Amino acid sequence: MAEFGLEGKITCIVTDNGSNMVNAINQWDGVERLPCAAHTLQLSINRAFQKTNIYIKRIKRLVHFFTSS
């Protein structure tokens, strides 16, 4: 921070939700961590797709059955 002349100029940092990043920012006095909204949204969407993937495969097999017969 001193090398770039940023001491005392940073008040907030945007990070992913990794525990290493959360711990690092929590140890930095006077700096607040803001979780990245895009990363959080991506994690939520991926989790939703994982849960619906079974149903999507079943529907694709059903559509294939009716369109190929």
Image (spheres, rainbow, N blue to C red):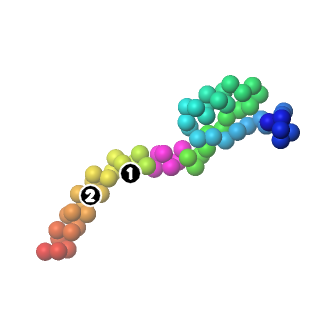
Q: Is residue 30 above or below residue 16?
A: above
Q: Is residue 54 left or right of residue 35?
A: left
Quadrant of the rendered structure where residue 68 is?
bottom left
Q: Which residue is mark 1?
A: 49
Q: In which quadrant will I find the C terminus?
A: bottom left
Specify start and end residues of the magenta stretch as a single range: 40-45
Q: Amino acid at mark 2?
A: Lys
The answer to which of 19 and 51 lies nearer the viewer is 19
Q: Name the spot of residue 42 as percent of width and height, x first.
A: 50, 49
Q: Which residue is mark 2?
A: 57
Q: How many marks?
A: 2
Mark 1 neighbour density, 10 Å: few (under 14) some (14–19) many (20 or more): few
Q: Is residue 21 above or below residue 41?
A: above
Q: Secondary structure at mark 2?
A: helix
Q: Is residue 43 left or right of residue 30?
A: left
Q: Residue at x 21, y 63 (%)?
A: 61
Q: Amino acid at mark 1?
A: Phe
Q: Is residue 53 left or right of residue 43?
A: left
Mark sitting earlier along the chain (1/2):
1
Q: Secondary structure at mark 1?
A: helix
Say whether residue 24 is magenta.
no
Mark 2 neighbour density, 10 Å: few (under 14) some (14–19) many (20 or more): few
Dominant SS type (magenta):
helix
Q: Name the spot of residue 55 as percent of width and height, x first.
A: 27, 54
Q: Name the spot of residue 26 as percent of width and height, x first.
A: 66, 27
Q: Is residue 68 above or below residue 43?
A: below
